[in-house]
Amino acid sequence: MNLSPALQERYTKESMTAREAQRLAEFIAWGPAVFQASRILLKWSILDLIRDSANGMTLEEIRQATGRSEYAVKCLLEAGLCIGLLLVDTTTERYTLSKTGWFLLNDPATRVNIDFCHDVNYEGWFMLEESLLNGKPEGLKHFGPWPTVYEGLSSLPEQVQESWFGFDHFYSDSSFPEALRIIFDEHHVKSLYDVGGNTGKWALQCVGYDKEVQVTILDLPQQIQMMQEHVKGKEGAERISGYGMDLLDPDAAFPQRADGPDAIWMSQFLDCFSMEEIVSILTRARQVMTPETRIFIMETLWDRQRFEPAAFCLTMTSLYFAAIANGNSKMYNTEDMQQCIERAGLRIEKIHDHLGQGHSIIEVKVNSEK
């Protein structure tokens, strides 16, 4: 395993004292309560009120400002102290934000993660053990009877959809500007397959960036329908087409072009599949490639992260895939992805690291030796 320097420092040697380790063990034991108390402190704007006050706030001031009971506010403030979100002046009994509280309140990634974990994952994670044992997303059942979350995405409750897409788009959108430059400025792509294109957000970015490119989105028929509604009337929409297919079907072929597509784009897509399924998808992509076609695989590979908190978020996201999404995929490392690429008769030409929120783009071409 080849870890980035920050991960090598954190994951290969002990860094805590015994007392710190004991506290973290208890933190884990009370994790569900820690999460919910922190989320409510955000939802009820208690952290906002404290941040915006001149010198912190007392319990009574918070009670009056929120209209909540003294009991509720006291429970949350005391939890906030022990979690590490708040500090208290024992003389004035005024509460202020800690550094952790400030990040919880102000870091956009953290806010997206909280909504995603609460709305999409929280109840389903109760079935994580069964999901890992069975290789199926057993936690998805409380939403509906679908085999994976993707078939049911358009039928999920509105708030769940909002948090799901908010999570998905937050991490990909930050990488779009650099990705567009790589694809269109470095390689002058004029025909592109967007595999697993969802709502067409990336496709719209492409046709807006390059006035000649033709984009074909490959996705489930119900997703193609959602995409068509989303792009309707937007600039460049006439250069976006859809091709409905079940990418999990090993017999579902990619659409053929006489000259092959210039590029095949897979953004935060292959992590939605098992390694065997990835090999199948890449093998079928290879069948429509010319020697000049490139596959651009954009993923948040956890072992290449510059900062350790990013790797933490990514490996926890694997548990969403286990219990909710499909039961057999995860956030992969470079070694896993390279193995799949080579098994499909392809080769890595170049890797671009540290794009946006920790993304890498792997440029892949046909392995002429196979």
Image: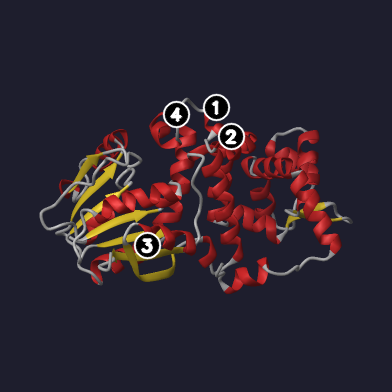
- Where does the image place residue 128, in percent across and percent down from the top left? 62, 38
- Binning the other alpha carbons within 10 Å of mark 4 as few (below 14), some (14 to 19) or many (20 upward) gives some
Residue at the farthest front position: 370
Mark 4 vs mark 3, CA separation in Å: 32 Å
- Where does the image place residue 163, in percent across and percent down from the top left? 49, 41
Mark closer to the observer (4, 3): 3
Secondary-structure class at tag 1: helix
Residue denoted by label 3:
342
CB atoms of marks 2 and 1 within 8 Å: yes
Q: From the viewer's perspective, is residue 186 above or below residue 334?
A: below
- Binning the other alpha carbons within 10 Å of mark 1 as few (below 14), some (14 to 19) or many (20 upward) gives few
Tell me the residue at 39%/70% (across/down). 352
CB atoms of marks 1 and 3 within 8 Å: no
Q: Please give the label number shown on residue 45.
A: none
Residue denoted by label 4:
146
- Binning the other alpha carbons within 10 Å of mark 3 as few (below 14), some (14 to 19) or many (20 upward) gives some
Secondary-structure class at tag 4: loop
Amino acid type at image mark 1: His
Residue denoted by label 1:
142
- Where does the image place residue 52, in percent across and percent down from the top left? 65, 54
* Residue 199 position by quadrant: top left
Quadrant where the N terminus is found in the figure: bottom right
Residue at the farthest left position: 258
Mark 2 vs mark 3, CA separation in Å: 35 Å
Quadrant where the C terminus is found in the figure: bottom left
